[in-house]
Amino acid sequence: MEPEIKLCQNCKKEFTIEPEDFKFYEKMQVLAPTWCPECRLVRRLSFINTWSLHWRNCDVCKEKTLSEYPPEDKIKVYCQKCWWGDSWDGTEYAMDYDSSRPFLEQVKELSDKTPYVALESQYSTLKNSEYSNSIAWSKDCFQVFWADYCEFVYYSSILNGLKFSSDCLRGWESELCYESTGFIRNYRAFFSEESDDCLDVWFSRNCYGCSNCIGCVNLRGASYQIFNVQYSKEEYAEKMKELRFDSWENLHAFEKQAREFWLTKPYREYHGHSLNLNVTGEHIYTSKNCKEMYIANGAENCKWTQLITVKPAKDCMDYTGWGNNASLVYEAGNVGENANNIKFSSLCFPDCLNLEYCIWNISGKNNFGCVNLKRKSYCILNKEYSKEEYEKLKTKIIADMKKNPYVDKLGRKFYYGEFFPLEMGRFPYNKSNAMKFVPKEKEQALKEGYDWAEREDLVYKTTISSDSIPDSISDTDESIIKEVIGCMNCGRGYKIVKGEFDLLKKMNLPIPHECPKCRESRRFARMNRPGMYHRNCDSCKKEIYTPYAPGRPEIVYCVKCYQQEFA
């Protein structure tokens, strides 16, 4: 079989379907896509909202609850306790299939009348973590997003097994970390990036197995170094005292100096490690036979797959989060935990099997076109059937979808085999996960058929300005948690919660002068986004495939050159 070049139905650019892609489509019994890989990714991401939250009242108990959906969104929204309760299961909203109408039009009608849960979580696996989203198997977490198996963590995202930490991004199996990104098995890592198995490191990048290092880059097994210069243990301790990292002013002056130093040292072609085999992409770990990946741990035989934060995920394509024993997933987002054979679906977990065109299915098996359905099998449009009736009607619907597609407002056609039309998404582009990873301007998003929200986040009345916060945590008492602080950047009011204050005291770090949103945005802006580029290694000049676009300021080495110099 030869590669096939197709024209994307959405962006009108050419893309290639490789022979191995056709084999996967045949295995999954689906047609080849009509949207290119990037447009497919953005479409999936637009159906999920992890980070943009609002206050509204539960439509059952009327209690105020934190929600993905703003109060002006005229849909039914239940708080987590009411949604996960046993008083309803979704079959109350069952519809009969009408063969005279496009099937996805009927799924959209069903989705408009069923109740949505305020936050995305595995509610029964959480303890004291009701102000976090996209979270499972965690306790005592506050404003934590896309996380599993975490404890006592604050204002952090994309995590697995993080404890007693705050303001982190992409952290795994680590403890007492702060303002760090991309790390595994670290203990006390501060303001550092892409550093694994480290102890007491500050402002360091791409360091492995290091301890007591400050402002260092590309070190292996080093100790007592500052800006890659060796010190004795005693000299290092004296320098550490002089730097006074308990001071906000000193911390941020040193961070600027450290990041300037980082740019003088090479970056590896992509972020991953030696346990990978035959992979391409960015932030890939312990994976094999995976292509065009982005943030994946423990993936095998996958392609165009992102945000696999809990291993394993096997035999998946066009899959955006989260793994945890997921297999045979195609064109789906936020499904996992023993999910198998899931197509064109989102928000289906745990223990789901054989789902197609489903949204918010909990422990569902053999369902087609169901929305907000819990613990049911052999359902179509939330109506239960016998196994034989289900299989017969499903076959008819698929045949109908191939002849009578859903046509959206821009004239794009959605036959069987395509993910949901954009018009079925619940979130404006700028409030969805798409904005986090593939940011667009308002005009571009609207042109492509996405919605856009003009709603501004709430601005709370502040009681003190950030410049009135004591410079050192040692000079700050617990009364700070009663204040509403004005962010030094955007002016937005924010508070310090008790657990966060205690953690900062324990780590001897000052109270942040920026609001959580500004801190979060800064971390995401520094992380490479999805997308790979062809450029030349800055050492051997060989062509490489890397997330660093040509023209960026970083010095980039191919894997071989990088390992020869720094391994």
Image: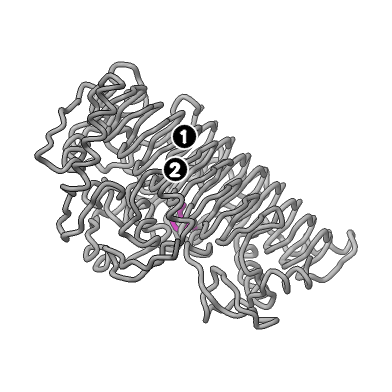
| Residue indicated by mark 2 | 329
Q: Amino acid at mark 2?
A: Val
Q: Is residue 517 magenta?
A: yes
The main secondary structure of the magenta stretch is helix
Quarter holding the C terminus?
bottom right
For this rendering, which residue is in front, 173 or 278?
278
Q: CB under 8 Å between callouts 1 and 2?
A: yes
Relative to 92, is 213 above or below?
Answer: below
Residue 140 visible, this orientation: yes
Q: Is residue 509 visible?
A: no
Q: Which residue is mark 1?
A: 339
The residue lying toward the viewer, choosing from 497 and 416, is 416
Q: Quadrant of residue 40?
A: bottom left
**Amino acid at pointer 1:** Ala
The CA span between labels 1 and 2 is: 8 Å
Q: Is residue 564 above or below residue 451?
A: below
Q: Quadrant of residue 343?
A: top left
**Label whose residue precedes the other's in the sequence (1 or 2):** 2
Residue 82 or residue 412, whichever sits in front:
412
Residue at image position (52%, 57%) is 293
Determine the secondary structure under disc 1: loop
SS label for mark 2: strand
**Which span of residues is magenta-colored?**
514-518
Magenta stretch contains residue 208:
no
Colour scheme of this structure image?
Answer: one colour
Image position of 435 (left or right of 180)? left
Expressed as whole percent of the image width and height from the top left, the position of residue 254 reads 65, 68
